Image (cartoon, helix red, strand yellow):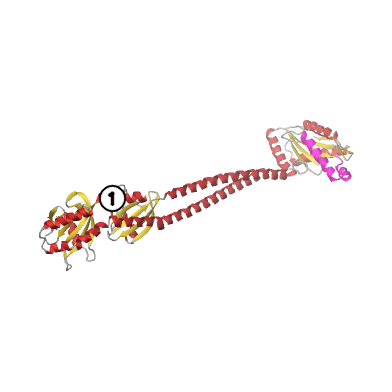
Amino acid sequence: MGNHVWNDKKKFIWLLSVLLLVAFLVTSGISYKVAHDSLSQQIESNTLPLTSDNIYSEIQQDLLRPIFISSLMAQDTFVRDWMLNHEQEPEKLVRYLKEIQEKYDTVTSFFVSEQSRNYYHSTGILKKIQDIDPNDAWYFRVRSLPESEHYEINIDSDTADRTKTTVFVNYKVFDFEGKFIGVTGVGLAVEKVKALIELYQKRYNRRVFFTDRQGRVTLHGDEYDGADSLQTSAGLEQLATRILTSPSAAFSYQRNGKTAYLNSRLVPEFKWYLIVEQEDAPQEQELLNTFWGNLALSLLVTIGILLISNMTLGRYQRKLEVMASTDKLTGAANRQVFEEYFHQALEKAKLSQAPISILLVDIDHFKKVNDSYGHSIGDLVLKTVANLLRSQLKTQDVLCRWGGEEFLILVPEQDLSQAAELAEQFRDLISQRELKVNGVHIAITVSIGVAEYQKLEPAEDLIKRADLALYQAKEAGRNQVVLNQ
């Protein structure tokens, strides 16, 4: 029974452990997910778009200015009148281009005539544009732009200095009747544009770069470590088409094991997409730390609850075991538990060939005590006899309340003579004990039957022989010890 109760206790503790841990894990997980989703939503729908808007506004101030300058140049009456005057006095146009370059702080300013194909620069006439020269392909590309498109932005080597890469704004020029007469524009140093991107990145703690309408990365900072196009960027392959077909969009994707948030916005004047990215926010790590902290705290709480539960169950288990295995009045083992001990002791005696004996003790004239003095006095007599018997027993001996006024004592490793000697000690000790209740003296005596286990004897026969000896002791006048050999 003890093992059964212990197994039930272990099952209960394990079940409680699993339930508590699962409950804490699910609660912490749900809290983390809700907070994480809320933070992600905040970044995607608010924080990142706001940053993108701010950067876009600064771009309009910093990078759209060259488009405005080129537009002024293309609409300038002086340029168109000079062209209609058959490009006479080219030094006037060169001086004009130089003034534009100095006034607006550009790295270059130019005009290419459709009529003469001369490339005019702020330093003079640099060359003639030729359709067979790959370096002049830009001019024919601009010249072939649809009527609705008046300019392009191009990153190319500067014709005046092939060692420099420049961001050109190439603007088509028409005469007063709408006839194409050339291309004009200005250029910004790529390093200057990159410096602006670096400034945005440091100011907003985001990754900033530009792509063209085909997804090719056109401009980025020096610390950019991404791919050359959206289509080849890890994690962005599936999103590239959606980004390039929407004027603005917000996405999140996995990059290097982290969640990256992306906001894209088409800059119509550049015909480029502004891409602003942010990896997990600092709050994300705080959420993760809180999640693990909650789990650790949950584990400690679980351990605490389990310890308390184990202690409480242990106390209740011991109480239940005592209630289930002992006689409530005398504290002796009950009959059911005694039978378990009895059979175990017999099996052990068979293996070790050691003797084992039993003593069957009966309180003399107990019914008379109950009838004369009441059941409360009878209970007192039972407890007194049980305590006297228990006081003489060894650790391995077992005292059992066998019946109303009968006690059965199991004494392993004692033969009949040793058991008889112990029985005589019991009889003598009890007979010397006299109870005094309300001035009345009550004498107590016991009759004892003793039997030793015989080889291959059934347990029931051993008890029957002890019971027979007890009967003989009573018949002989009580307060005696009789042996059954």
Q: Residue at x 69, y 39 (%)?
A: 344
Task: Check the image and report above or below for 116 versus 16.
Answer: below
Magenta part of the chain: 364-391
351, 105: nearer the viewer: 105
Residue 226: x and y, percent?
Answer: 32, 50
- The three-letter code of the residue at mark 1 reads Lys
* Quadrant showing the C terminus: top right
Residue 27: x and y, percent?
Answer: 53, 52
Is residue 152 within the magenta segment?
A: no
178, 249: nearer the viewer: 178
Residue that numbered label 1 is attached to: 194
* Quadrant showing the N terminus: top right
The answer to whether 166 appears left or right of 29 in the picture is left
The answer to whether 19 appears left or right of 464 in the picture is left
Task: Check the image and report above or below for 347 versus 254.
Answer: above
Q: Residue at x 33, y 57 (%)?
A: 57
Residue 436: x and y, percent?
Answer: 87, 38
Asked whether residue 215 is in view, the answer is no
Label 1 crowd bin: few (<14), some (14–19), many (20+), radius 10 Å: some
Q: Residue at x 78, y 37 (%)?
A: 387
Residue 6: x and y, percent?
Answer: 64, 44
